[in-house]
């Protein structure tokens, strides 16, 4: 299906994210999507859902309301948004491509298991729709360089859409935390791992009760060459193919022997 998006105006694109329907990242992604097609729809959480992962709302009803033409808010998770968009709102003509983001902050290494941005792309992939997650790295205390995603996003997507789309696979794109002129090109990467420093805070509320707060990730140490973490360190745009089958294939044979 994705091949139809090579020429502008030839495909239906669905956009979602986990930062909320009014976030600056989703507006940046809309601009990129409209360079590929005039048929662009936005279905995103009405409130921020960062860290929601691939969670699905099952214990209460969901509300979908139109905030502008082809722009809808859902009082749920990014996964909820994809399900409602594909199975109800756009069921007569499902999207040809799903774009999730642009997230404010990178999604590399272990972030993939927590990220609502990546989860929206995962859900689309499970539904058989080509999907890409896009995230913009930034440095604490500095403005988010949205212009970097704007500069590289159209070219990255065009290159991906000209290739056969692999089964059960989404692409995870991360833009470096520098202006476009300081980016050093592309890197096709594997998912990395980081040495994550502890950032669990604790305190006492005004009523004397203890509380705990999981803060932003603080990193320590280096990054393995060829990984998404290393690519951002080197100011490169990282492109990582993510497969939905989590089976550890090399372990299967030995495990079967243990249970014979």
Image (spheres, grey):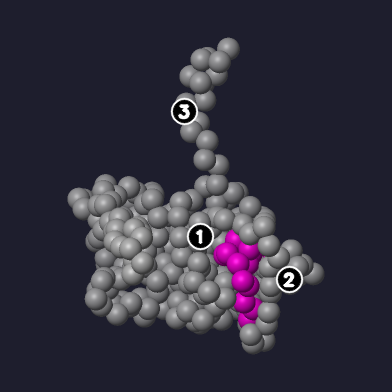
Query: Is residue 191 in view from this perspective?
Result: yes
Front label number (3 vs 1): 1
Residue 173 rendering spot, x and y as whole percentages? 43, 62
Secondary structure category for the residue under label 1: loop
Q: Nearer the viewer, residue 218 or 8?
A: 218
Residue 17 in the magenta stretch? The answer is: no
The CA distance from mark 3 to mark 1 is 31 Å
Q: Nearer the viewer, residue 171 or 79?
A: 79
Q: Range of the magenta residues?
A: 71-84
Verify CB contact (< 8 Å) between mark 1 and mark 2: no
Residue annotated with mark 3: 250
Residue 104 rendering spot, x and y as whole percentages? 40, 71
User: The C terminus is located in which quarter?
Assistant: top right
Q: Earlier in the sequence, mark 1 or mark 2?
A: 1
Front label number (1 vs 2): 1
Q: Is residue 38 left or right of residue 92?
A: left
**Residue at x-position 48% and y-position 33%:** 248
Secondary structure category for the residue under label 2: loop
Residue annotated with mark 1: 52
Q: Earlier in the sequence, mark 2 or mark 3?
A: 2
> Mark 1 packing: few (<14 Cα in 10 Å), some, or many (20+)?
some
């Amino acid at each position: 299906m994705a091949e139809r998006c090579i020429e502008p105006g030839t495909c239906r694109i669905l956009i979602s994210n986990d930062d909320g329907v009014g976030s600056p990242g989703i507006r940046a992604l809309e601009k990129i999507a409209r360079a590929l097609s005039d048929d662009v729809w936005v279905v995103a959480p009405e409130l921020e859902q960062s860290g929601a992962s691939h969670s699905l709302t099952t214990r209460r009803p969901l509300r979908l309301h139109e905030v502008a033409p082809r722009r809808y808010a859902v009082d749920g998770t990014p996964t909820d948004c994809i399900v409602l968009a594909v199975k109800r709102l756009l069921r007569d003509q499902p999207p040809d491509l799903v774009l999730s983001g642009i997230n404010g902050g990178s999604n590399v290494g272990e972030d993939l298991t927590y990220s609502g941005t990546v989860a929206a792309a995962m859900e689309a992939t499970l539904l058989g729709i080509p999907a890409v997650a896009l995230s913009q790295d930034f440095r604490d205390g500095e403005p988010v360089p949205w212009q970097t995603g704007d500069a590289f996003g159209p070219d990255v997507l065009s290159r991906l859409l000209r290739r056969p789309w692999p089964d059960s696979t989404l692409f995870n794109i991360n833009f470096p935390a520098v202006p476009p002129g300081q980016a050093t090109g592309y890197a096709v990467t594997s998912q990395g791992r980081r040495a994550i420093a502890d950032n669990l805070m604790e305190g006492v509320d005004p009523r004397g009760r203890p509380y705990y707060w999981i803060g932003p990730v603080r990193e320590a140490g280096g990054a393995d060459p060829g990984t998404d973490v290393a690519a951002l360190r080197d100011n490169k745009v990282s492109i990582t193919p993510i497969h939905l089958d989590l089976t550890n294939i090399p372990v299967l044979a030995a495990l079967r022997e243990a249970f014979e």
